[in-house]
Image (cartoon, rainbow, N blue to C red):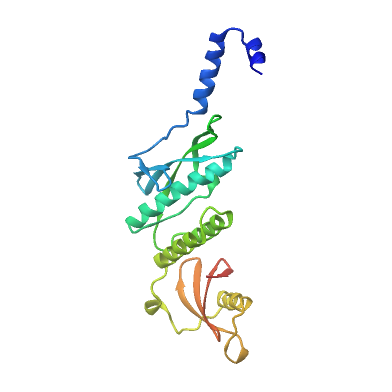
């Protein structure tokens, strides 16, 4: 093999000029920060810069890859910036929408051919959400992140609870004994029945409207097994 290389490049100086740029290119994925760089417990880096309606997080993620897998690197970088965004938003007492791995901006990435280390620089601008703004969309987004393995079940449960608490006032101040009527209430009861909810004496369960926005209604369903909560939006209902 060595003899073959020397035959192809008899001029050692020319060989050096070729090897050096290749080596440098393989190692050139350096962090690209937007503010003061901070390190995670795993040694990755992130930085945050506030914007008009939220903030930008830039991340630098590294992992050893025996076989190159760009998507795995992108997902790892997404976790770095999502974790940083969650902590930053919590510190401000606000909520943000979290992106999926294919929604973040990949600044650059590369795998070192010598060390087999994959480096990824990514960033995303997180927007604050308030009150009832698109919280159902955020719950759907969280479910996708959980399904893809981008977040753990514990992270999902904590974030879901925070999203719902930011939208729905405590039950003691919001629950009502007024029984709703109409198609939406019927669909909410039907959804609860699908999940095994049984009303008193084996009949249809009773629903109470406890929250309402322009395009969403939240119901408390009374079952013999206990209380169930259902949300309905544009005629489609799902159990919390």
Point 48% across, 49% down: residue = 79
- The N terminus - image quarter: top right
Q: Is residue 39 above or below residue 1?
A: below
Q: Is residue 104 left or right of residue 148?
A: left
Residue 238 visible from this viewpoint: yes
Residue 200 image-quadrant placement = bottom right
Q: Position of residue 187 (x, y in %)?
A: 59, 75
| Of residues 86 and 136, the one drawn nearer to the viewer in this rendering | 86
Point 47% across, 59% down: residue = 155
Q: Is residue 21 above or below residue 34?
A: above
Toward the top, the furthest residue is: 11
Residue 127 visible from this viewpoint: no
Toward the bottom, the furthest residue is: 201
| Of residues 21 and 239, the one drawn nearer to the viewer in this rendering | 21
Q: Position of residue 204 (x, y in %)?
A: 60, 85
Point 51% across, 18% down: residue = 20
- Total marks in image: 0
Q: Position of residue 112 (x, y in %)?
A: 53, 31
Residue 210 image-quadrant placement = bottom left
Q: Position of residue 18 (x, y in %)?
A: 55, 16
Q: Is residue 4 above or below residue 72?
A: above
């Amino acid at each position: 093999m060595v003899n073959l290389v020397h035959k192809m490049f008899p001029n050692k100086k020319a060989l050096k000029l070729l090897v050096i740029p290749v080596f440098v290119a393989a190692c050139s994925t350096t962090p690209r920060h937007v503010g003061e760089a901070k390190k995670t417990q795993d040694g990755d880096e992130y930085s945050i810069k506030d914007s008009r309606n939220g903030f930008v997080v830039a991340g630098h993620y590294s992992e050893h890859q025996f076989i190159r897998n760009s998507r795995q690197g992108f997902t790892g970088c997404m976790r770095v910036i999502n974790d940083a965004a969650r902590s930053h938003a919590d510190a401000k007492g606000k909520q943000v929408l979290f992106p999926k791995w294919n929604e973040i901006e990949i600044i650059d990435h590369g795998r070192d051919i010598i060390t087999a280390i994959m480096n990824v620089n990514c960033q995303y601008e997180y927007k604050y959400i308030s009150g009832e703004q698109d919280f159902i969309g955020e719950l759907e987004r969280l479910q996708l992140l959980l399904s893809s393995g981008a977040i753990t079940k514990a992270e999902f449960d904590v974030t879901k609870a925070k999203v719902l608490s930011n939208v729905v006032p405590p039950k003691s101040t919001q629950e009502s004994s007024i029984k709703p009527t109409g198609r939406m209430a019927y669909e909410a009861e039907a959804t609860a029945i699908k999940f095994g909810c049984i009303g008193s004496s084996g009949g249809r369960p009773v629903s109470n409207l406890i929250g309402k926005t322009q395009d969403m209604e939240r119901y408390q369903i009374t079952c013999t097994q206990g209380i169930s909560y259902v949300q309905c939006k544009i005629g489609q209902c799902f159990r919390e």
